[in-house]
Amino acid sequence: MSAVYAAISQTLAIVAALLLAPVLTGWVNMCRAWLQNRSAPSLWQPYRVLHKLFVKESVVAEHASPVFRAAPYIVFGCMLVACAIVPTLSTDLPLSSAADAIALVGLLALARVFISLAAMDVGTAFGTLGARREMLVGFLAEPALLMVLFSASLISQSTSLTTIVETLAHQELAIHPVLAFAGVAFTMVSLAENARIPVDNPATHLELTMIHEALVLEYSGRHLALIEWAAALKLFAYSCIGLALFFPWGVAEAQAPLALLLALPALVVKLAIGGMSLAVLETISAKMRIFRVPEFLATAFLLALLLLAFAMISQRRILSLIHLFTLQGATLVVATAAVGYVTQQPHLYASAVITFALKVLLIPMMLHRVIDRLDIRWDVEPLINIPTTMLIGILLVIFSFDMATPIARLSSSVARGSLGIALACVLLSFLMMITRAKAVPQVIGFLSMENGLFFAATSATHGMPMVVELGIALDVLIGVLILGVFMFQIREQFDSLDIRHLERLKED
């Protein structure tokens, strides 16, 4: 019986995605027309466009390869599977056990790769231009999207979207600055990935500014219909991801037929509110220049870095703290490589490699070895409760941005929003050191503080001389070794890693 219910839930989710995706696009277009005091198109206009394209003959370029012909089907399939993975109506989805949040991002990336290859396949200038812009947007947006999904997975201790929804839906209403920053970052990523204002205008056909339209200029007939339907499915998928992460209420649980029936109208209402919000945002925003898009997406990525710092001060488990530190190191690697690409500084790539080897591989491995030897996988006892710590953290973020604003005005566009975030990461790491009584989380807080300083140096000054970076890396490594020995000595002397025992030391 449970297998039948799961199959019905999965089928309804796929059918709902296929039917509601064009309606969502039509609803957004209708709301935009109302807000701009124009005559609104019909809600069913996307269906009419799809029908018109499906009955038309497809015209294919003479020298088009099989990649060009197969790309619309692959892109449509990827988007449909992505919609099937996201819990829209029920958490009892057979496909969710086969693919988690990381696989979801991989599906979106696979669709991007094929549509970009198809755009370059024919050899037109506009197709190549759109493909390069699409890959640039993906390069900057995907890491931020992963950080957003990881922030929610840390709360549920799982990367499965169904588990995340079940955990968040049953949590009490509380202050979650991590999810607040994640929500802002996700909104920015969603606007960029779906070619919406301010990144792109889906209604424009200006060759110098368009991204999505440049990719599909050579398609017609059923191929263009599949691509347009896939674009609607992508908007539907991102909308449902946002609803699953930040508004998970109304999704049916396993073997709850009545809740499954009520989930559909709840989904329609949430999509209607989300579509209206998107239309309002696009109406009050102006399209930015294409050269400002990397800065826009870099801000989303920096917010993801800040939410990692908040996740660290709210985390009680030492093992999760090490995982967060590893994610922070990986974020620094991507940020350093991105700054090197934008500023054409080749030595930053070497710095990114060193950061990856030291802060993603070596130091986390050493910390895992320490906690295995000391057998300290239990929860960390903070000196101040978590809600109070989070409120203090919010005040520190406000203070950091206020302090960094005068300096940021004098900085380049790449570093304009990074100084306040770097200072906030340093202060939040210092707060974690103050509020934790155990030695291991204090060591992790010290290392996280060094990550914030490294990020500030990389983004504001485009890196330090390689000799200085190598020296700092060696100092950090030696510092970790010394702190490891220090922790073993505390454990041997007091049979505990609580540093408050050091207050009882007296000279004989």
Image: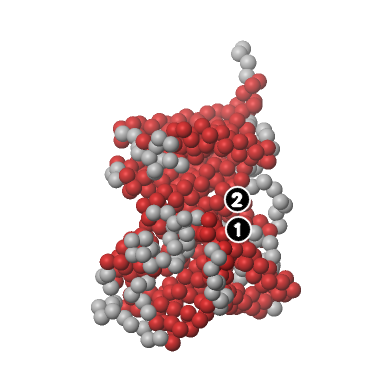
Q: Which mark is residue 179?
A: 2
| Residue 369 visible in the picture | no
Residue 388: image quadrant is: top right
Q: Secondary structure at mark 2?
A: helix
The three-letter code of the residue at mark 1 reads: Leu
- In the rendered image, residue 80, in percent from the top left (x then y), is placed at 51, 73
Task: Give the residue at x 42% y 68%.
Answer: 111
Mark 1 Cα shell of 10 Å, populated few (<14), some (14-19), many (≥20): many
- In the rendered image, residue 125, in percent from the top left (x then y), is placed at 27, 66
Task: Give the residue at x 70% y 54%.
Answer: 171
Task: Give the residue at x 67% y 72%.
Answer: 264
The answer to whether the residues at label 2 and label 1 have Cβ atoms under 8 Å apart is: yes
Nearer the N terminus, badge 2 or badge 1? 2
Q: Is residue 123 left or right of residue 48?
A: left
Figure label count:
2
The three-letter code of the residue at mark 2 reads: Leu
Q: Nearer the viewer, residue 371 or 40?
A: 40
- In the rendered image, residue 226, in percent from the top left (x then y), is placed at 44, 77
Q: Nearer the viewer, residue 349 or 52?
A: 52
Task: Give the residue at x 64% y 21%.
Answer: 503
Q: Is residue 422 left or right of residue 174?
A: left
Q: Which residue is mark 1?
A: 245
